[in-house]
Image: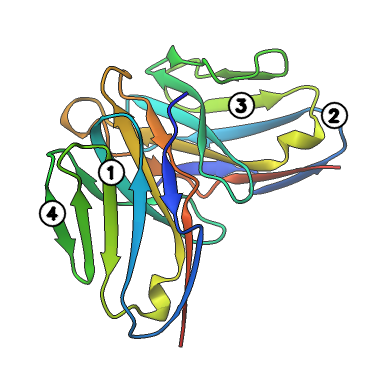
Amino acid sequence: EAGVAQSPRYKIIEKRQSVAFWCNPISGHATLYWYQQILGQGPKLLIQFQNNGVVDDSQLPKDRFSAERLKGVDSTLKIQPAKLEDSAVYLCASSPAGAGANVLTFGAGSRLTVL
Amino acid sequence: TQLLEQSPQFLSIQEGENLTVYCNSSSVFSSLQWYRQEPGEGPVLLVTVVTGGEVKKLKRLTFQFGDARKDSSLHITAAQPGDTGLYLCAGTYTGSARQLTFGSGTQLTVLP
């Protein structure tokens, strides 16, 4: 079974620039999550999709962050404009519906450095 | 915002030693998970516990869920260098609609 794919793995940008991250979840997984992990901290949920609908985006800084999952499969997370404090690893995870809904599989992450 | 505290933050031990890491909250979990994360990778699920007092074993790892479902511990017996990594606990709180809240992790280094 293929895992959760994320790209790019690394991105370096200057503040005020924009960046986009892409995630392809495990085939058939209904729920997709974007987490932000700042160095030395645990992952923080940014947004959770169930199919192509948003379940929770309460911690997403909506003035600069946006995410979409148009066809209920892959997803894009965008930051515009980036700030220094956005430097972090952005982790995508997916989980199936039903009994396995709390079993999250994470991708390797996209490491963002904002200069 | 629910807070999930892990201790210790850092732990460095010699191969063969035993260790315990802790995860605590003031709120009740409906379920709790432990993950291990290696550098450059995403967290990998080790175990899920749902019942107060539950104990689960995974080879040399023993996971315990507190009776009141507010705390958990991970005990590693005879640690090996391959156990090195960031250990994260993550809980789903009662009434949180399955949102998973992570602790800040325990960075374990096992020296050969």
Report the front residue among A87 and B92.
Answer: B92
**Do tags 1 and 4 sit on the same chain?**
yes
User: Residue tagged by mark 3?
Assistant: A77
User: Residue tagged by mark 2?
Assistant: A17
Amino acid on which disc 4 is placed: Val
Relative image position of residue A77 (x, y in whole percent): 61, 26
User: Residue tagged by mark 1?
Assistant: B71
Relative image position of residue A103 (x, y in whole percent): 28, 39
Q: Nearer the viewer, mark 1 or mark 3?
A: 1
Amino acid on which disc 3 is placed: Leu
Horizontally, is A101 left or right of B14 in the view? left
**Do tags 2 and 4 sit on the same chain?**
no
Relative image position of residue A70 (x, y in whole percent): 50, 15
**Do tags 2 and 1 sit on the same chain?**
no
Q: Nearer the viewer, mark 2 or mark 1?
A: 1
Q: Is residue A1 visible?
A: no
Q: Residue at x 28, y 17 (%)?
A: B95
Alpha carbon of mark 2 to alpha carbon of mark 4: how far?
49 Å
**Whether residue A92 is situated above or below residue B88 in the rendered picture:** above
